[in-house]
Image (cartoon, rainbow, N blue to C red):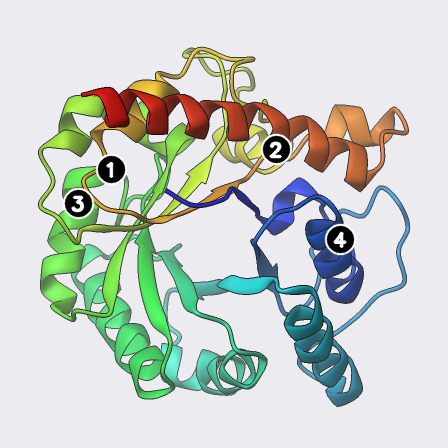
Amino acid sequence: MNGPGIDFLTVFALPPVAFVELAADLGAPSISLILEPLDYDPEGHAPYSLRTDRALRRDLVAVARDRGVTLALGEGLVVRPDRDVRDLYADDIAIMAELGVRCINILSFDPDTARTFDQYALLAEMAGAAGIDSAIEFSRGRPSTPDLPTALAAWRHVGRPDCRILLDTMHLVRSGGTPADVAALAPGTIGYVQLCDVPLAPAHPVYFEEAAFSRLPPGEGELPLFDILMALRDDPVVSVEVPMRAAAEAGVGPRERAERALAPARALIDRVAAARATA
């Protein structure tokens, strides 16, 4: 089990070159990225666009190569109602291939399950043609892919060896999943793990408000993280996704927030490795 890396929500709108430098300085082997920042930017960074700024793309490729940081996951490719992913994301996938992104994260805001599954298959096909793997994310609150069983059905529908499932520890437990469910998965099912902690009971009435802004470092919540990681039968990429808006607005910078997430995640991964070695 590698890592952990750092997913972009942990550092919010930190520009990509600075993000790679931060990851390398902290010893993280990988990051996830999004082509343009989300609106929330507590540090007030200069806006950027990997879609339109070719020089920035060149700089990102160079710094990732020079600092030994993998661009493990490309995010932001969302199935939307009444829009075809071939129209929405052909250019984005080409840019991610240019950057050397290893895998794309695919999820859906479309309530139509059958259409979502077909759109997932198209996205995975587009990514595969560009040499990029894909990973299907499930989450409570997304009606077409709300939980692990539905994600498994979507994965089987896609039916590609370069497509697997993204396991977010918050989404797994909050949607009713357990370590036993993870242990029951066939090898080759999980390709990416987003690691965080939260209380078992929702901390905010709007699920995605908590998911996007208010997660906890491993060990500060109530998720059975050790048991989840022990249950994995694959060796997926593991990355911390720990957005902490309250800390950011209290003046805690992206480096300190990332360090706060990485340290307990590393300790947890070390515990899992030690337990497996003696099993």
Residue where numbered disc 3 is placed = 150
The residue sitting at 57% across, 48% down in the picture is 7
Q: Quadrant of residue 47?
A: bottom right
Instruction: Look at label 1 and name its amino acid.
Output: Asp
Confirm or deny contact between disc 4 and disc 2 (CB under 8 A).
no
Horizontal side of 67 relative to 212 (left or right) equals right
User: Horizontal and vertical percent for residue 250?
Assistant: 87, 24
From the viewer's side, name the closer residue of 270 and 150: 270
Q: Secondary structure at mark 4?
A: loop
- Choose mark 1 or mark 4, whichever is in front: 4
How far apart in space, not on screen, are marks 4 and 2 (Cα)? 18 Å
- Choose mark 4 or mark 3, whichever is in front: 4
Q: Earlier in the sequence, mark 4 or mark 3?
A: 4
Residue where numbered disc 2 is placed = 262
Give me the disc on residue 147.
1
* Residue 32 drawn above or below residue 231: below
From the viewer's side, name the closer residue of 231 and 250: 231
Q: Quadrant of residue 224?
A: top left
Horizontal side of 80 relative to 42 (left or right) equals left
User: Horizontal and vertical percent for residue 118?
Assistant: 20, 70
How far apart in space, not on screen, are marks 1 and 3 (Cα)? 6 Å
- Choose mark 2 or mark 3, whichever is in front: 2
* Residue 155 drawn above or below residue 87: above
Residue where numbered disc 4 is placed = 13
Which quadrant would the N terminus be assigned to in this image?
top left
